[in-house]
Amino acid sequence: MARTTSSAATRDRILVATTELFRRQGYSATSLSQIVEASSATTGSIYHFFPGGKDELTAEVLRVSGAGYGDLVESVVRSALDPAVGIGDAFAAAAALMQESDFIDPCPIGTIAREVASTNEPLRLVAAEVMNGWVRRLAAILTDANVSQGDAERLASLVVTTIEGGFVMARTLRDVAPFLTAGEVVQRLVADALGDS
Amino acid sequence: MARTTSSAATRDRILVATTELFRRQGYSATSLSQIVEASSATTGSIYHFFPGGKDELTAEVLRVSGAGYGDLVESVVRSALDPAVGIGDAFAAAAALMQESDFIDPCPIGTIAREVASTNEPLRLVAAEVMNGWVRRLAAILTDANVSQGDAERLASLVVTTIEGGFVMARTLRDVAPFLTAGEVVQRLVADALGDS
């Protein structure tokens, strides 16, 4: 039992360290030796848990952090008075996180996706599945609130687009204002759709 | 004269080749030796034109391609019936370009900005100046059409945010639909602002 726990802890430590490196510097700049150092793991243990090496580890980081980010956004949105307010809250929470973390990327997936989209098809497909999952989950929240399927899908896609673009702007400018502006607009559009439903 | 022309041609070839590499694979994955090969230049000539090496070359690529992309968007927007239609046209043109180019990144600046924002402050500042320039140019088009300064700045920021987020989505999903959805929404918001002005 102790050994299993320790194994799971090592695997988690590798995933967390790799995610943090990706949030600071993206995929291409992150070497296996940096991951070894940051996770206090050995190269052998990385290949033990991820026999495909850096790319298998990257795919797992995309899946785990993508699902985690999706869970977080969904819980923020669902705990609000209505989905429009909830989506506004999700933008505000992300803005606060960026400021607290000195503008480290809240979403390593968008950066990695853009780095690898033309050069690493297996990783592009994993990133696409993550993004499609976010859109599906947000669309489901909106259809639950009686927005039509088509409008829900378009709005959900717009939310993910503005969040990703907002991360580009906020990180580049070290300023959350453009991100919050985008959030206000999207919140208003969702409120309009809820009003029409 | 012949020598000057040839020199300028070599410098241009280096810039174009580097821009293309960045559009396919981003900043970190692009090595100086790849740039040498793709531009048919020598390492010596790269350091002749860009004594600071890869980072000085990268800064110049950001400035040149940023200004070029700004010029293109401004000319598309200004040649339309009104800025709302023009902004819709700019999204449509970018979508067409992505499909024609097999989804190579239309904007290496967004990818590079996100790759280097926490690790290379001089390059982050260049990317920020480029993005702020886009916002200023778009805001000027809107104030020329009698939109108030505050609304113009917010809308211009939103246009850049949605374009950048749209590139993330389109490149990841190999699908321009989310990009065009975002473009339609932004076009409608700009039309509303023009109607109010």
Image (cartoon, coloured by chain):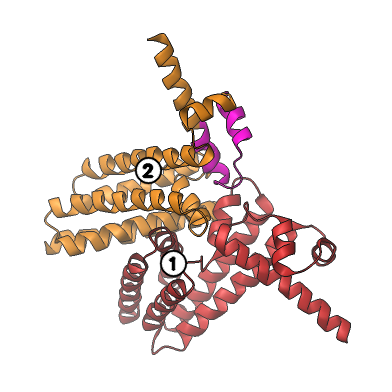
Chain colours: A orange, B red
- What chain letter is assigned to the residue under label 2? A
The label on residue A66 is: 2
Magenta span contains residue A36: yes
In the figure, B171 relative to A113: above or below? Answer: below
Q: Residues within 10 Å of mark 2 (few under 14, many from 20)?
A: many
User: In the current view of this chain or complex, which residue is farthest to the front?
Assistant: A51
- Residue A166, position as x, y percentages in the image: 44, 56
A39 with respect to B84 (left or right): right
- Residue A170, position as x, y percentages in the image: 49, 53
In the figure, B43 relative to A51: above or below? Answer: below
* Residue located 25% across and 63% down the image: A154
Look at discs 1 and 2 and give the one toward the viewer.
2
* Residue located 51% across and 84% down the image: B75
Residue B76 visible from this viewpoint: yes
Magenta span contains residue B31: no
Q: Residues within 10 Å of mark 1 (few under 14, many from 20)?
A: many
- What chain letter is assigned to the residue under label 1? B
The label on residue B163 is: 1
